[in-house]
Image (tube, grey):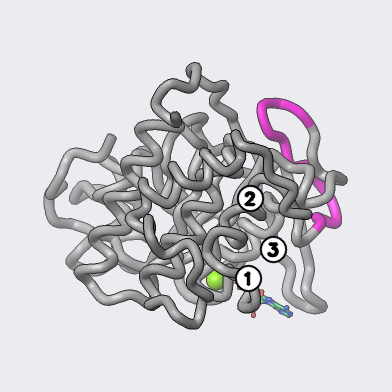
Amino acid sequence: MIADKPARQVASLTLDKTTFSYGETTLAFDVEFPAGKISAVMGPSGSGKSTLLNLVAGFEIPSSGRILINGKDFTATSPAERPVSMVFQENNLFAHLDVFRNVGLGISPSLTLDSGGHAAIADALARTGLAGKEKRLPRELSGGERQRVALARALVRDRPVLLLDEPFASLGPALREDMLELVAAMQIERKMTTLFVTHQPEDARRLASHVVFLENGTVAAAGEAADFFSADGPEAFRRYAGSAGSTPLASNAH
Ligand code: ADP
Ligand code: MG
Protein backbone atom coordinates (compact mmCIF):
# COMPACT_ATOMS: atom_id res chain seq x y z
CA MET A 1 0.00 0.00 0.00
CA ILE A 2 1.16 3.52 -0.80
CA ALA A 3 0.59 4.77 2.74
CA ASP A 4 2.96 2.15 4.20
CA LYS A 5 5.94 3.13 2.10
CA PRO A 6 8.89 4.57 4.04
CA ALA A 7 9.56 8.31 3.87
CA ARG A 8 11.29 9.03 0.59
CA GLN A 9 14.14 11.29 -0.23
CA VAL A 10 13.01 14.70 -1.42
CA ALA A 11 14.92 16.12 -4.37
CA SER A 12 16.21 19.61 -4.94
CA LEU A 13 16.10 20.75 -8.56
CA THR A 14 18.35 23.33 -10.18
CA LEU A 15 18.65 24.65 -13.70
CA ASP A 16 22.21 25.90 -13.43
CA LYS A 17 22.83 28.63 -16.02
CA THR A 18 21.04 26.64 -18.72
CA THR A 19 20.52 28.07 -22.19
CA PHE A 20 18.52 26.67 -25.06
CA SER A 21 17.72 27.94 -28.56
CA TYR A 22 15.03 27.31 -31.14
CA GLY A 23 16.77 29.01 -34.06
CA GLU A 24 16.60 32.72 -33.29
CA THR A 25 14.77 32.32 -29.98
CA THR A 26 17.13 31.85 -27.03
CA LEU A 27 15.95 30.98 -23.54
CA ALA A 28 18.08 31.11 -20.42
CA PHE A 29 17.13 29.70 -17.02
CA ASP A 30 19.12 29.92 -13.83
CA VAL A 31 16.78 28.88 -11.07
CA GLU A 32 16.38 26.55 -8.12
CA PHE A 33 13.15 24.82 -7.08
CA PRO A 34 12.67 23.95 -3.41
CA ALA A 35 12.85 20.26 -2.56
CA GLY A 36 9.59 18.47 -1.79
CA LYS A 37 7.40 21.51 -2.52
CA ILE A 38 5.00 22.57 -5.24
CA SER A 39 6.25 25.48 -7.34
CA ALA A 40 3.88 27.22 -9.72
CA VAL A 41 5.52 28.08 -13.03
CA MET A 42 3.67 31.03 -14.51
CA GLY A 43 4.08 33.49 -17.34
CA PRO A 44 2.56 34.62 -20.61
CA SER A 45 2.17 32.26 -23.52
CA GLY A 46 5.53 31.81 -25.23
CA SER A 47 7.52 32.84 -22.15
CA GLY A 48 9.26 29.45 -21.94
CA LYS A 49 7.29 27.42 -19.38
CA SER A 50 7.08 24.26 -21.47
CA THR A 51 10.69 24.58 -22.56
CA LEU A 52 11.80 24.82 -18.93
CA LEU A 53 9.90 21.62 -18.07
CA ASN A 54 11.18 19.87 -21.20
CA LEU A 55 14.75 20.68 -20.18
CA VAL A 56 14.15 19.11 -16.76
CA ALA A 57 12.47 16.05 -18.32
CA GLY A 58 15.23 15.65 -20.91
CA PHE A 59 13.04 16.14 -23.98
CA GLU A 60 15.30 19.10 -24.78
CA ILE A 61 19.01 19.30 -24.02
CA PRO A 62 20.48 22.66 -23.00
CA SER A 63 23.21 24.09 -25.21
CA SER A 64 25.00 25.20 -22.05
CA GLY A 65 24.54 24.82 -18.31
CA ARG A 66 23.41 21.86 -16.21
CA ILE A 67 20.28 20.19 -14.87
CA LEU A 68 20.95 19.16 -11.27
CA ILE A 69 18.66 16.93 -9.22
CA ASN A 70 19.78 16.57 -5.64
CA GLY A 71 23.10 17.96 -6.77
CA LYS A 72 23.62 15.21 -9.32
CA ASP A 73 24.16 16.18 -12.96
CA PHE A 74 21.42 14.76 -15.23
CA THR A 75 22.10 17.04 -18.21
CA ALA A 76 23.07 14.18 -20.52
CA THR A 77 20.71 11.54 -19.09
CA SER A 78 17.88 10.20 -21.26
CA PRO A 79 14.30 11.08 -20.17
CA ALA A 80 13.51 7.51 -19.07
CA GLU A 81 16.54 7.44 -16.77
CA ARG A 82 15.75 10.71 -15.03
CA PRO A 83 14.04 10.71 -11.62
CA VAL A 84 11.22 12.66 -13.24
CA SER A 85 7.57 12.16 -14.33
CA MET A 86 5.72 14.54 -16.61
CA VAL A 87 2.03 15.12 -17.31
CA PHE A 88 1.12 17.21 -20.37
CA GLN A 89 -2.03 19.21 -21.12
CA GLU A 90 -3.34 16.27 -23.17
CA ASN A 91 -2.24 13.30 -25.27
CA ASN A 92 -0.51 11.60 -22.35
CA LEU A 93 -1.92 8.18 -23.21
CA PHE A 94 -1.37 5.51 -25.83
CA ALA A 95 -4.64 5.23 -27.76
CA HIS A 96 -4.36 1.45 -28.31
CA LEU A 97 -3.65 0.56 -24.67
CA ASP A 98 -6.31 0.28 -21.98
CA VAL A 99 -6.23 2.22 -18.72
CA PHE A 100 -4.47 -0.55 -16.81
CA ARG A 101 -1.66 -0.77 -19.36
CA ASN A 102 -1.34 2.98 -19.76
CA VAL A 103 -0.75 3.20 -16.01
CA GLY A 104 1.51 0.12 -16.06
CA LEU A 105 3.89 1.91 -18.42
CA GLY A 106 4.86 4.02 -15.42
CA ILE A 107 6.33 0.90 -13.85
CA SER A 108 7.67 -0.94 -16.88
CA PRO A 109 7.98 0.36 -20.46
CA SER A 110 7.65 -3.25 -21.66
CA LEU A 111 4.66 -3.85 -19.35
CA THR A 112 6.47 -6.63 -17.52
CA LEU A 113 4.51 -6.47 -14.27
CA ASP A 114 4.86 -8.68 -11.21
CA SER A 115 2.20 -8.98 -8.51
CA GLY A 116 3.63 -5.96 -6.73
CA GLY A 117 3.23 -3.98 -9.95
CA HIS A 118 -0.37 -5.10 -10.33
CA ALA A 119 -1.10 -4.07 -6.75
CA ALA A 120 0.53 -0.66 -7.25
CA ILE A 121 -1.56 -0.04 -10.37
CA ALA A 122 -4.78 -1.07 -8.61
CA ASP A 123 -3.91 1.22 -5.74
CA ALA A 124 -3.15 4.19 -8.03
CA LEU A 125 -6.41 3.61 -9.94
CA ALA A 126 -8.33 3.59 -6.67
CA ARG A 127 -6.59 6.78 -5.53
CA THR A 128 -7.50 8.55 -8.76
CA GLY A 129 -11.09 7.35 -8.80
CA LEU A 130 -10.59 5.04 -11.77
CA ALA A 131 -11.29 1.66 -10.17
CA GLY A 132 -13.51 -0.38 -12.51
CA LYS A 133 -12.27 1.45 -15.62
CA GLU A 134 -9.13 -0.69 -16.10
CA LYS A 135 -10.24 -2.11 -19.44
CA ARG A 136 -11.34 1.15 -21.06
CA LEU A 137 -9.43 2.65 -23.94
CA PRO A 138 -8.53 6.36 -23.76
CA ARG A 139 -11.24 7.23 -26.28
CA GLU A 140 -13.81 5.70 -23.91
CA LEU A 141 -12.87 8.15 -21.16
CA SER A 142 -13.72 11.79 -20.49
CA GLY A 143 -10.96 14.40 -20.65
CA GLY A 144 -10.80 14.49 -16.86
CA GLU A 145 -10.51 10.73 -16.62
CA ARG A 146 -7.68 10.70 -19.14
CA GLN A 147 -5.78 13.22 -17.02
CA ARG A 148 -6.42 11.03 -13.98
CA VAL A 149 -4.86 8.11 -15.82
CA ALA A 150 -1.81 10.27 -16.50
CA LEU A 151 -1.62 11.17 -12.80
CA ALA A 152 -2.05 7.51 -11.83
CA ARG A 153 0.89 6.67 -14.06
CA ALA A 154 2.96 9.37 -12.34
CA LEU A 155 1.93 7.84 -8.99
CA VAL A 156 3.18 4.34 -9.89
CA ARG A 157 6.27 5.72 -11.59
CA ASP A 158 7.04 7.24 -8.22
CA ARG A 159 9.89 9.58 -9.13
CA PRO A 160 10.89 12.45 -6.85
CA VAL A 161 10.32 15.17 -9.45
CA LEU A 162 6.85 15.73 -10.96
CA LEU A 163 6.30 18.08 -13.90
CA LEU A 164 2.74 19.19 -14.67
CA ASP A 165 2.45 21.26 -17.85
CA GLU A 166 -1.00 22.86 -17.71
CA PRO A 167 -2.45 19.44 -16.97
CA PHE A 168 -5.98 20.69 -16.31
CA ALA A 169 -6.20 23.53 -18.80
CA SER A 170 -8.73 21.70 -20.98
CA LEU A 171 -11.02 20.75 -18.07
CA GLY A 172 -14.03 22.61 -16.74
CA PRO A 173 -13.87 24.36 -13.34
CA ALA A 174 -15.52 21.59 -11.25
CA LEU A 175 -13.26 18.90 -12.64
CA ARG A 176 -10.23 21.13 -12.27
CA GLU A 177 -11.09 21.54 -8.63
CA ASP A 178 -11.11 17.74 -8.14
CA MET A 179 -7.79 17.40 -9.92
CA LEU A 180 -6.19 20.14 -7.82
CA GLU A 181 -7.25 18.24 -4.73
CA LEU A 182 -5.75 15.07 -6.13
CA VAL A 183 -2.41 16.77 -6.81
CA ALA A 184 -2.45 18.32 -3.33
CA ALA A 185 -3.08 14.87 -1.81
CA MET A 186 -0.34 13.28 -3.91
CA GLN A 187 2.04 15.99 -2.79
CA ILE A 188 1.28 15.53 0.90
CA GLU A 189 1.85 11.80 0.54
CA ARG A 190 4.87 11.72 -1.77
CA LYS A 191 6.65 15.03 -1.17
CA MET A 192 7.56 15.27 -4.82
CA THR A 193 9.36 18.35 -6.01
CA THR A 194 6.56 19.52 -8.27
CA LEU A 195 6.58 22.11 -11.05
CA PHE A 196 3.02 23.08 -11.87
CA VAL A 197 2.48 25.22 -14.96
CA THR A 198 -0.75 27.14 -14.74
CA HIS A 199 -2.31 30.31 -16.08
CA GLN A 200 -4.67 30.47 -13.12
CA PRO A 201 -3.34 32.51 -10.17
CA GLU A 202 -6.09 30.85 -8.13
CA ASP A 203 -4.62 27.38 -8.81
CA ALA A 204 -1.17 28.59 -7.89
CA ARG A 205 -2.48 30.05 -4.66
CA ARG A 206 -4.24 26.83 -3.78
CA LEU A 207 -1.31 24.52 -4.42
CA ALA A 208 2.01 26.26 -4.57
CA SER A 209 4.36 27.38 -1.85
CA HIS A 210 6.73 28.92 -4.38
CA VAL A 211 6.24 30.77 -7.67
CA VAL A 212 8.60 31.11 -10.62
CA PHE A 213 7.45 33.74 -13.08
CA LEU A 214 8.82 33.68 -16.63
CA GLU A 215 8.92 36.40 -19.26
CA ASN A 216 10.66 36.34 -22.64
CA GLY A 217 12.43 33.05 -22.05
CA THR A 218 13.88 33.78 -18.67
CA VAL A 219 12.98 34.01 -14.97
CA ALA A 220 11.58 37.47 -14.30
CA ALA A 221 10.80 36.80 -10.62
CA ALA A 222 10.86 33.89 -8.17
CA GLY A 223 9.92 33.54 -4.53
CA GLU A 224 7.44 32.47 -1.88
CA ALA A 225 3.83 32.32 -3.04
CA ALA A 226 2.72 34.47 -0.11
CA ASP A 227 5.01 37.27 -1.30
CA PHE A 228 3.92 36.94 -4.92
CA PHE A 229 0.28 37.22 -4.06
CA SER A 230 0.66 40.09 -1.63
CA ALA A 231 -0.10 43.66 -2.66
CA ASP A 232 3.62 44.39 -2.98
CA GLY A 233 4.51 41.27 -4.97
CA PRO A 234 6.84 41.49 -7.96
CA GLU A 235 5.73 44.22 -10.36
CA ALA A 236 5.97 42.02 -13.48
CA PHE A 237 3.82 39.34 -11.87
CA ARG A 238 1.20 41.79 -10.68
CA ARG A 239 0.90 43.19 -14.17
CA TYR A 240 0.44 39.68 -15.55
CA ALA A 241 -1.98 38.44 -12.90
CA GLY A 242 -4.04 41.62 -12.86
CA SER A 243 -6.48 42.08 -10.01
CA ALA A 244 -6.43 38.37 -9.14
CA GLY A 245 -2.76 38.72 -8.18
CA SER A 246 -3.22 41.44 -5.56
CA THR A 247 -6.12 40.17 -3.45
CA PRO A 248 -5.32 38.51 -0.12
CA LEU A 249 -4.51 34.80 0.00
CA ALA A 250 -7.78 32.90 -0.16
CA SER A 251 -6.42 29.71 1.31
CA ASN A 252 -3.30 28.74 3.12
CA ALA A 253 -0.65 27.59 0.62
CA HIS A 254 1.43 24.77 2.12
P1 ADP B 1 5.14 28.53 -23.03
O1 ADP B 1 5.05 27.09 -22.62
O2 ADP B 1 5.44 29.45 -21.88
O3 ADP B 1 3.97 29.00 -23.81
P2 ADP B 1 7.26 27.61 -24.79
O4 ADP B 1 8.32 27.06 -23.92
O5 ADP B 1 6.38 26.66 -25.49
O6 ADP B 1 6.42 28.71 -23.99
O7 ADP B 1 7.94 28.52 -25.91
C1 ADP B 1 8.99 29.43 -25.60
C2 ADP B 1 9.47 30.11 -26.87
O8 ADP B 1 10.06 29.13 -27.73
C3 ADP B 1 8.36 30.73 -27.70
O9 ADP B 1 8.90 31.90 -28.30
C4 ADP B 1 8.04 29.69 -28.73
O10 ADP B 1 7.54 30.28 -29.90
C5 ADP B 1 9.39 29.06 -28.97
N1 ADP B 1 9.26 27.63 -29.33
C6 ADP B 1 8.72 26.65 -28.57
N2 ADP B 1 8.77 25.46 -29.18
C7 ADP B 1 9.35 25.69 -30.37
C8 ADP B 1 9.69 24.86 -31.48
N3 ADP B 1 9.45 23.55 -31.46
N4 ADP B 1 10.29 25.45 -32.54
C9 ADP B 1 10.56 26.77 -32.56
N5 ADP B 1 10.27 27.61 -31.55
C10 ADP B 1 9.67 27.09 -30.48
MG1 MG C 1 3.51 25.69 -22.82
48 vs 161: above or below? below
Label 3 near ligand 1 (CB < 8 Å):
yes
> How far apart, in angstroms, are the residues tagged by discs 2 and 1?
13 Å
> How far apart, in angstroms, are the residues tagged by discs 3 and 1?
36 Å
Query: Is 191 left or right of 234, judged from the image as shown?
Result: right
Quadrant where the N terminus lies? Answer: top left
> How far apart, in angstroms, are the residues tagged by discs 2 and 3?
30 Å
Q: Name the residue that disc number 1 marks.
A: 97
| First in sequence: mark 3 vs mark 1 | 3
- Indicate which quadrant contains ligand 1: bottom right
**Nearer the observer, 114 or 157:** 114
- Amino acid found under the numbered disc labelled 2: Gly
**Nearer the observer, 143 or 103:** 103
| First in sequence: mark 2 vs mark 3 | 3
Q: Name the residue that disc number 2 marks.
A: 106
Residue furthest out toward the top: 6
Percent across and percent down for residue 172 are 26, 76
Percent across and percent down for residue 192 are 49, 36
- State the extent of the magenta-drawn residues as a range: 61-72
Label 3: few (<14), some or many (≥20) within 10 Å? many
Label 2: few (<14), some or many (≥20) within 10 Å? many
Label annotation for residue 27: 3
Residue located at (34% from left, 39% from top) = 209
